[in-house]
Amino acid sequence: MAKQYSPAAVEKSIFWGRSCGSYFEVCTRYYVLPPPNVTGALHIGHALTVAIEDAIIRWRRMSGYNALWVPGVDHAGIATQVVVEKKLMREKKLTRHDIGREEFVSEVLKWKDEYGGTILNQLRRLGASLDWSREVDYLDIKEETMLKVPGYNTTVQFGVLISFAYPLEEGLGEIIVATTRIETMLGDTAISVHPEDNRYKHLHGRYAIHPFNGRKLKIICDAELVDPTFGTGAVKVGADSEYLTISI
């Protein structure tokens, strides 16, 4: 017997692999692993969370349920963009604008593949009782995502563009904004358009009126962060945590 505990030796022997698939044949309970961001390797906080989740899953199985626990990682959007941008600057002295969108997306996917694999291997070494035959890549969701919003009876489809109209001041009509974050519209403080978009040139510097609280939303221009070909070409700007709106 070893004189002291060896994590490396123990972790290799506790891998919860495909051989445990019989636990998932008829599933009466489904659990999705809150997907770790691929911004780096897992730390002690992740280990604590996974241990708690694993205990809940195992308790369900011990209670007679065939509980399915699905593994995966989250591409993390803006958070991953930031770390990849820092890596590009550190290693190549380049920005995402220097290399263009297509090459930058390629760099992000390389990062995801590298750190996504590291994270999943760490989860295996932790002994998490996940069904590894059902691993999910959160960039490849094929089905519509319908979610329940507390206090609202109708399911809402997330991850798609939703268009809604803001009335303009002085009865000038309306401006239609497209967004994937309709739930943040109560915090909107402005609307941004591309300065060369002919559809909105007559509205530069004018105001829309928030229909719920009467707040005046100034229509501002941003040539770098607004794509006139995407959605309606009008972007809502609010007091949320999105990198784009903070930059504007």
Image: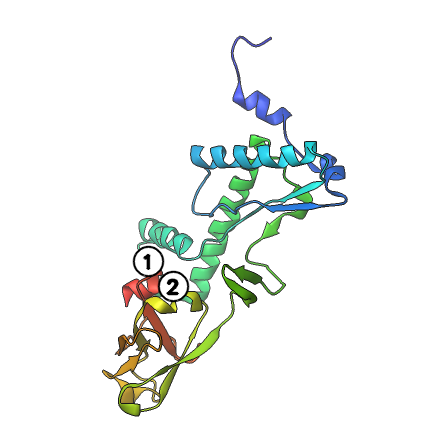
As drawn, which residue projects farthest toward the left?
205
Q: Residues within 10 Å of mark 2 (few under 14, many from 20)?
A: few
Write down the residue under mark 1: 94
Mark 2 element type = helix
| Quarter of the image that includes the C terminus | bottom left
| Residue type pointed to by label 1 | Leu
Residue 84 is situated, as x and y percent measured from the top left of the image, at 39, 52
State which quadrant residue 237 falls in. bottom left
Which residue position is annotated with label 2?
99
Q: Residue at x 31, y 76 (%)?
A: 192
> Residue at horizontal 60%, vertical 31%?
127
Kind of element beneath mark 1: loop
Q: Looking at the image, is mark 1 or mark 2 earlier in the sequence?
A: 1
Can residue 43 be seen in the rendering of this structure?
Answer: no
Q: Amino acid at mark 2?
A: Ile
Q: Is residue 20 above or below residue 160?
A: above
Residue name at image x 25 percent, y 84 percent = 204
Q: Does residue 73 lie above or below 239 as drawn?
A: above
- The answer to whether residue 14 is seen in the rendering is yes
* Separation of residues labelled 1 and 2 (CA atoms): 7 Å
Asked if labels 2 and 1 touch by Cβ distance under 8 angstroms, the answer is: yes
As drawn, the label of residue 204 is: none
Q: Residue at x 63, y 47 (%)?
A: 135
For residue 25, side relative to residue 39 (left or right): right
Figure check: 127 above or below 220: above
- Is 189 rendered above or below residue 7? below
